[in-house]
Image (cartoon, rainbow, N blue to C red):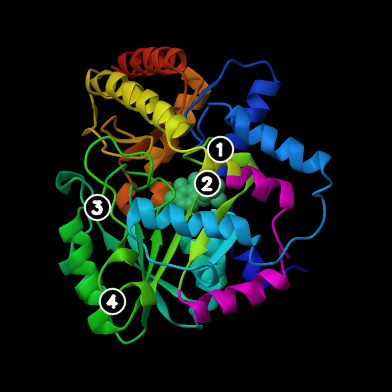
Amino acid sequence: MFSRRIRELAPSGTIALSNKVSKLKAEGIDVISFTLGEPDFATPVNVIRAAKDALDAGDTHYTPSMGIKGLREYIARHVFRKNGIKTGIDNIMVLPAKFALYAAVQAIVNKGEEVILPDPAWVSYGPMVQLAEGSVRSVPMEYENGWHLRALDIENAINSRTKAIVLNTPANPTGSVMTRPELEEIAKLAKEHDIFVIADEVYEDLIYEGVHHSIASFEGMAERTITVAGLSKSHAMTGWRIGWIIGNTEFISNVNKLQQHSLTCLPGFIQQAGMEALKSGAGNVEMMRREFLERRNMLIPLINSIPGLSCEVPKGAFYAFFRADLGMDSMKLSERLLEEAHVAMIPGSAFGPTGEGYMRMSYAASRNDIAEGMRRIKEFVEALG
Ligand SMILES: Cc1ncc(COP(=O)(O)O)c(C=O)c1O
């Protein structure tokens, strides 16, 4: 009845678990959830006001499929000032970041071609490649090496079928931040082997140590880099579904065809809000970043104080990806934590085979929830003996 393509597609592990949490909460169970990568702040008021004003002004119709020109101009200025990416409005499309990544893979990957993914990596890259009938080539990373991607491992994974490498810095689920020399080595490989880099930079504003570098700004990389970012994580705008994709003009015009036959466009009032977010500077972003930093500094010692758990200090994003040596696999641990301690977090295995033995805890949660959640986990671990 259903296509093989869709039958073979697994549901998102993260969304499935958060749906389960919602169900338990609806039954009156006091679950503390550290599952979703979603800032718990309200969207800044000026951004909400801009959307309301646009609605009142009748901005409720179709907009250009690439996104409105004013917003694309803002994005061009924003990425140049912040990340040194030299680009113009014909290189930019306004899309939700997740759809942008899906569209990027659809636009470049043919059946049988390979995409190199870090392992562990965000849960949706693999299924996106699968939907394009491509194959994933995973490059395992190591906890002991701070979950950094090694250029040598990437080089060993490249072959004649390789189409693209996905880089995600700061990374979900590990919180690692790639350094400039690391990115330079990968840029060199991409040029030598004529492959695309898909740079997922949705967490670019959430860095606590180190600096964000956009590989698209490196010498000779603009042509072959597809940069995806957005406002979800930086401006607490996950529900607005607004982000962008940057690439060479030929790539963008191909993504635009996909847009025209699928989403059509993003709502105008959402794009007006997006403009306001970019216009209003970094004040709100910085306030939220500082709060995440405080929570991280509170959380990591709590994790490390529990026997069997250990975590290096993550440098970016808002996830702790901690080791859990408790005599059960990460899926079992996730199930038992939810059922017995009423704490939800994502099993590391959801992010790839190398994630087994780890758990992802999002600290985009209140300090109270972090304190109470960790108390429950400690109690659970002590009861295990
Ligand atoms: C690494 C990564 N890329 C992309 C996305 C998608 O972002 P958005 O919700 O803005 O589409 C997420 C969301 O969790 C993510 O973690």
From the top left corner, tell me how far across and down residue 220 is, in percent.
28, 76
Q: CA distance from mark 4 to mark 2?
A: 37 Å
Camera-side mark, 4 or 2: 4
Residue at image mark 1: 17
User: Which contiguous range is marked in magenta?
Assistant: 248-275
> Quarter of the image containing the N terminus?
bottom right
Q: Using the image, tell me which numbered label, if any, was put on residue 30.
A: none
Residue at image mark 3: 178
- Residue drawn at x 56%, y 60% as measured from the top left: 72
Q: Residues within 10 Å of mark 4 (few under 14, many from 20)?
A: few
Pick whichever of labels 4 and 3 is earlier in the sequence.
3
Q: Where 365 falls versus 87 (above or below)?
A: above
Q: In this rendering, would 232 be left or right of 265? A: left
User: For numbered disc 4, what is the local secondary structure?
Assistant: loop
Camera-side mark, 1 or 3: 3
**Callout 2 amino acid:** Gly
- Give 228 or 310, whichever is nearer the viewer: 228
User: For numbered disc 2, what is the local secondary structure?
Assistant: helix
Residue at image mark 4: 220
Q: CA distance from mark 4 to mark 3?
A: 19 Å
**Callout 4 amino acid:** Gly
